[in-house]
């Protein structure tokens, strides 16, 4: 059990730590850590040439080429924006006449397995689908790696308008957006499914929803509106309070669900490089931090969208009727990355005694069957009757010296409507 859980945790964090693919989508903390990683490794580094896309990727080309440019990154919920900024030089005046290269924003969404690597050109990862090359010798490359290819990027992109405010860095806007739209039918769904709706909870993913609901002891399959309506009435009815009064209230009542949607992801960010360190992955801190997700003793079922939710206690009244715990998965190490497959039980080898019993049963069965060969002939003749509407079937069957003859008459008289055989 310990080994299996360790594998799951490695997969969970591998979106930011190396060439291992993850069974869950990268969430807000991982994308923010990815932006911090890009800013750290690209600080003071000059990039050159055209942005290169892999041949197998179906994402669009990035039409940017420059002799010298720098890269910076920012995150918002489940999106990362790379900004490519040309570096001006002494000959910029002559370049401006010909048309200066303009800065470009490239917005990336990580899908299920995206992450960044910064390596030498010789050590490019196998699934590096977007590459930015440095102008130093030997050349290095910042790569967007995505083994499953569910990730995407948008040249000259902006933050996706259908996504809500960031749960981590736009907290008040995020809270207002949720509480002002509780009449939306999205809040008719179970709270565990509503938490994955990026229109309202931009940055929440599978492990975060499990941890947040577990800390508040909220059943995952209760209606989202019933959980959040109390927060709305409380916020509009109470007058403004001083900072000291708010602190005392938080200590006495504890944080609500929307507050934890903000603070729990920041806890993961506070783990620092432990959550995003391609050079040396260390998941011990994250493993100790988890209280519910993939923790031994917790229950798990698939929600109405097929996503696994971890919880403790009663699932709630809106749980799927045919909900089942997902099958155990195992990780198989392969060159160029890991992948997941359903665990198959080893086949039991039959014993010698069982083999003999099967052989005897076949032999006894063969003895009772008539032998097939050229001596066996089957003939069937269909002859209409001379009277009425009957039908005569004359079948002859012979096997060796034993001959038998069967005559079947299907006859319907003119006096009755009954059939007889």
Image: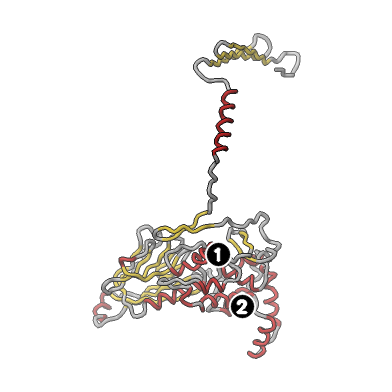
* Quarter of the image that includes the C terminus: top right
Of the residues tagged 1 and 2, which is closer to the observer? 1
Q: Earlier in the sequence, mark 1 or mark 2?
A: 1
Side (left or right) of 21 relative to 358: left
Within-10-Å neighbours for mark 2: few <14, some 14–19, many 20+: some
Residue at (64, 63) in percent of width and height: 299
SS for callout 1: helix
Residue at (51, 15) in percent of width and height: 375
On the image, numbered disc 1 is attached to which residue? 2
Q: Position of residue 377 (x, y in %)?
A: 53, 15
Q: Position of residue 357 (x, y in %)?
A: 58, 34
Side (left or right) of 180 relative to 144: right
Residue 278 sits in quarter: bottom left
Q: CA distance from mark 1 to mark 2?
A: 32 Å
Residue furthest to the top in view is 386
Can residue 164 be seen at all in this image of the molecule? yes
Residue furthest to the right in view is 416
Q: Position of residue 363 (x, y in %)?
A: 56, 27
SS for callout 2: helix
On the image, numbered disc 2 is attached to which residue? 259
Question: In front here: 21 or 371?
Answer: 371
Question: In front here: 416 or 343?
Answer: 343
């Amino acid at each position: 059990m310990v080994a299996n859980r360790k594998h799951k945790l490695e997969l969970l964090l591998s979106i930011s730590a190396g060439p291992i693919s993850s069974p869950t989508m990268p969430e807000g903390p991982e994308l923010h850590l990815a932006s911090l990683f890009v800013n750290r490794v690209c600080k003071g580094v000059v990039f050159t040439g055209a942005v290169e896309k892999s041949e197998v990727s179906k994402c669009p080309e990035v039409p940017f080429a420059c002799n010298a440019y720098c890269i910076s990154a920012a995150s918002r919920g489940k999106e990362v924006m790379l900004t490519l900024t040309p570096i001006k030089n002494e000959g910029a005046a002559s370049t401006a006449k010909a048309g200066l290269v303009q800065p470009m924003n490239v917005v990336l969404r990580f899908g299920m397995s995206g992450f960044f690597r910064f390596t030498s050109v010789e050590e490019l990862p196998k699934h590096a689908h977007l590459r930015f090359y440095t102008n130093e010798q030997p050349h290095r490359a910042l790569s967007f790696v995505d083994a499953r290819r569910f990730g995407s990027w948008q040249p000259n992109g902006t933050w996706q308008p259908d996504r809500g405010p960031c749960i981590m860095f736009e907290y008040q806007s995020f809270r207002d957006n949720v509480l002002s739209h509780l009449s939306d039918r999205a809040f008719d769904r179970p709270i565990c499914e509503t938490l994955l709706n990026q229109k309202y909870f931009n940055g929440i993913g599978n492990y975060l929803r499990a941890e947040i609901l577990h800390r508040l002891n909220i059943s995952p399959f209760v209606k989202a509106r019933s959980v959040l309506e109390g927060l709305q009435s409380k916020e509009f009815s109470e007058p403004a309070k001083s900072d000291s009064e708010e602190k005392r209230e938080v200590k006495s009542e504890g944080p609500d669900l929307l507050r934890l949607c903000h603070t729990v992801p920041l806890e993961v960010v506070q783990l620092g490089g432990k959550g995003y360190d391609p050079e040396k992955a260390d998941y011990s801190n994250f493993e100790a931090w988890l209280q519910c997700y993939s923790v031994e003793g917790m229950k798990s079922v698939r929600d109405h969208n097929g996503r696994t939710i971890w919880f403790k206690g009663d699932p709630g009244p809106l749980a799927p009727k045919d909900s089942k715990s997902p099958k155990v998965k195992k990780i198989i190490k392969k060159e160029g990355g890991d992948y997941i497959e359903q665990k198959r039980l080893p086949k039991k080898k039959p014993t010698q005694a069982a083999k003999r019993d099967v052989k005897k049963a076949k032999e006894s069965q063969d003895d009772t069957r008539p032998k097939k060969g050229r001596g066996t002939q089957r003939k069937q003749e269909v002859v209409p009757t001379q009277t009425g509407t009957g039908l005569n079937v004359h079948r002859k069957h012979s096997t060796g010296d034993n001959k038998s003859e069967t005559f079947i008459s299907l006859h319907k008289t003119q006096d009755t409507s009954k059939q007889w055989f």
